[in-house]
Image (cartoon, helix red, strand yellow):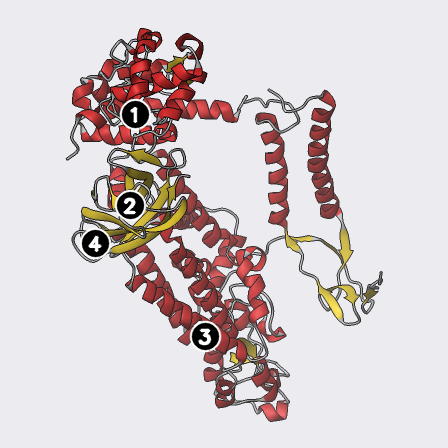
Amino acid sequence: MKVIPIVPLADDEGEMQSLYEAQKKIYPRSVTGRFAWWRWAFVWLTQVIFYGLPWLEWGHRQAVLFDLEARRFYIFGFVLYPQDFIYLTALLVISALSLFLFTAVAGRLWCGFACPQTVYTEMFLWIERKVEGDRTARMKLDSQPMSMEKLVKKWFKHILWGALAMWTGFTFVGYFTPIRELGLEFLQTRMGGWEVFWVLFYAAATYGNAGFLREQVCKYMCPYARFQSAMFDKDTLVVGYDVARGEPRGARSRKADIKQLQLGHCVDCSLCVQVCPTGIDIREGLQYECIGCAACVDVCDGVMDKMGYPRGLIRFSTQNAIKRGWTRREIWGHILRPRVLIYTAVLGALCLAVAFSLAMRTPLKVDVVRDRAALSRIVEGGKLENVYRLQIMNATERPQIYRIGAEGLQGIAVASETEVSVGPAESRWVAVRLQIPYGSAAPGSHPIYFRIGAASGDAHVSEKSVFLVPR
Amino acid sequence: MSDFNANFWSVWVAAITLAGIIGCAVLLWVTAKTKVPSHSDNTTGHVWDEDLSELNNPMPRWWMWLFVITIIFGLLYLVAYPGLGSYEGQLKWTTRGEHAAEMKQAEADLAPLYAQFTAKKVEDLAGDANAKAIGERLFMNNCAQCHGSDARGSKGFPSLADKDWLHGGTPDKIIETITKGRNGAMPPMAAAVGSADDVKNVANYVLSLSGAPHDSLRAQLGKPKFAACAACHGADGKGNQAVGAPNLADNTWLHGYGEQAIVNMINTGKTNVMPAQEAKLTEAQIRVLAAYVWGLSNIKSP
C-alpha cells in the first residue's frame, strides 16, 4: 500500500476557525444592463409559461394536465398513458444534454438566467427592493433596532412574498388538478386535504428557497452546480476579469493619467462585489460559487463607460482567450470542439427522433396477456380454443370502436366479440377467444398476431402472442 | 407479532440502531467544537500528491442544525413507530393495521355505490352497465384464475357462460355458491360397478347418453350396471343439482371427454372444490358478481 503523505503548506497559521460557518446575509445591489435585460426576459418567458399554461383550454379540458389519479397525461393534443413513459425519459435526456451543451459552450448559463432558483430569487429580490430599498437601504434597515417603520416594511415584504409563494404553489398543483376547479374549491373553501398540503408545501419551498436560502442552494445543495464544472474546459465562456488590463487596481479621478499613476483600468469601486448574488469577488478568478449571471459584467461596463475606458474589463470570455489576449473571432474559432460537436449531434438526433415518434404515434395501445389457468380447450364444433385478455387503451378523446382480428395460423378466427367499444381516454380489458380447427396445427406453441384497428380512422396496432396446442 | 425468535436479537438490533444515532450525535458534537487554524491562501493547509491542495470551504451552520433535526426526528420516530427490535412503538402502527384501515375506508367510500346495487333485483342488476363493469373487474380479480377470463372454465373448472349448471343457475343459487363455496365429490365407483370390463361397458353407456361415438354392444351391457350411478346422476343420467351431480347426457365434459376419461373417473373418483368467498368479499360485492355471472348466460350481449 502506498502511503500518500499530507504535506502542510506554508506555515502561516492564522486565527482558529470553526468547521461550520455562519451564513453571511448577502445584499445584492440592483443592476441594469445587457445581461440584466436578458435575465428579466427569461424571468418573464419562464414564468408566463409556468403561471399561464394551466389556464389554457384545449377543447373541453385543460391543455396541460397531469392526472395522476387516472394515470392520464394530457399535453395539448396528446393523451399520454403511463406506457408512454419513454417520452418522459426522452425529455429528461434532452434536458440533460442541453445542459451539457450550453455548459460546455457558455458555462453556467442555465444557473445565471433560467434556473427556477435564480428566477424566483430575482422576483423575490424585486419585491424586497420595492419595499425596503436597494442594497445600502436594506443593510441599514437590518442593522437598525426594531421600530414601527421596520416592522411595517418587514411585514409588508413577507406578506407579498407569501402571496407570491402561495400563487406559485397553487399554480404547481394546478398542473395535477384542473386549476379552474381548484380555484373554485379555494374560493368556496372546500379544497381537499392533499391539495391544501401540496399547495402549502410548494409555497413553503418557494418562500424558503427564494426568500432565505438563495445562493446557499447553489453553493451547498445543488447537484447540477457540482457537476457542471466537469463540463468546463479552457475554451468555455465564463465571466472573467482581465487581470492584465485591470491591475494594479486603485482609485483615481476621471481625468488622471493612469500611465503616470501606473494603474490598471480597475478603479476598485467594488461594485462587482456588491451586485454579486453569491457575494464573491470575481477579480480573484473563476470560483465555484460563480453562477455566470453576468451582473458584475453589466455593472463594470457602466463604470468603464463613466471613466471613458473601453468596456469588457469583466466580460464573458474563455480562460484561454483572457490569458492569450484572443479576439472575439479567435474565441468563435474554438467553439467547435469535439465535446460540443458530440453533444450537438446526439441532442439533434434525439430531438428529431422524439419529434418523429410523436408525429407517427398511434393513438391506440394494446397489451396482450394470455390466460395462465386455462391453457387451451377443446370446444364444440371440433375447435381448439385459447383465451387471451387484451387491454385496449384508447389514446384519443372520442369514443372508439375497435375491431379485433388475428392471424399467423391456418384457419385462426376470433370466436368472441370482434368489435369492442372503448370510451374517450379510457382503457378496457376484454377477454378474447381464438379458435382453430382441431388438429390443424402441430402440438406446441405457435406465434400469432393480434391485429387491432379503429373502425373509424387509421389507428392500427399489431401485437404478438402465442397459441398453444395441447399434446 | 415479533420477527425475533430470541430476545437477544431484539436487544442486539435495538442497540445497534441507537448506537448509530448516538454515534452520529457525538460526531456532530465533536466537529462543532473543533477549531482548525485558517491560512491566508484559503486552503486547509493540506497538500496531496505534491500539488493538490484542499480549499477551505466550511459547511454552513444551518446544515449542522439540519443534522440535529434529523437526529431528533429519528429518536421521535423510534418512540412512535416500530424500529427498535421487537418494540411496537407508541402508536402501535403495523402494516396489517394500516391495510385493515384502508380496506375499511374503501368499503365506506364504496358503500353508497353498492347501496344502489343491493336495492335492485339481481336480474335487473345484470343489465346495469355500471354494475356489469364492476362485476367484470371483480370477476377478473377473484374468479378468472380458475374459471378463465372469459368465464368459460377449462378442464376441471366449470364454464359459467353456458346454460349447464352443476348446482343451479338461479341468482340465489349463484350467490350461495360464491358465498359458501361448493364441494363436488364423486366417490370411486369401480367396486360398485363390477369388473374392469363392466366399468368399460358403463363408460360406453354414458357416452351413448349424449349421442357421442361409442361401442353400442358395450353400451347395451353397461346399461344395467348404470344403476350404481343412478343414485346421484339420475336414472336417465341427467344429473342432480341438489347434490351437484353433473348431467351425463349433454355435451359438457368437465373432466375430459372419451371412454378413457370416463373409466378413470369411475375408478378413482374426484373431489372438486369451489372455495367459499365470504371471507374475501362483502355481501354487496358477491351480489354484483352473481349478477355478472348470471348475465353471462342469460343476457345476449349487445
Q: CA distance from mark 1 to mark 2?
A: 45 Å
Q: Residue shown at 60%/48% (left/top)?
A: B62
Judge by depth and name the residue closer to the eye, A173 or A219.
A173
Q: Which residue is mark 4?
A: A58
- Which comes sooner in the sequence, label 4 or label 3? 4
User: Disc 3: which chain?
Assistant: A
Residue highlighted by disc 3: A344
Residue type at mark 3? Answer: Thr
Read off the residue under disc 1: B214
Subunit of label 4 = A
How crowded pointer 1 is (Cα within 10 Å; few <14, some 14-19, many 20+) is rated as: some
Callout 1: chain: B
Dot 3: what SS?
helix
The amino acid pointed to by label 2 is: Ile
Residue A431 in percent (x, y) is at 29, 38
Q: Could you tell me residue A310's position as x and y percent?
A: 49, 87
- What chain does mark 2 sit on? A
Q: Secondary structure at mark 4?
A: strand
Q: Position of residue A324 (x, y in %)?
A: 60, 88
The residue labelled by disc 2 is A392
Q: Are marks 3 and 2 in contact (CB under 8 Å)?
A: no
Q: Are marks 1 and 4 in contact (CB under 8 Å)?
A: no
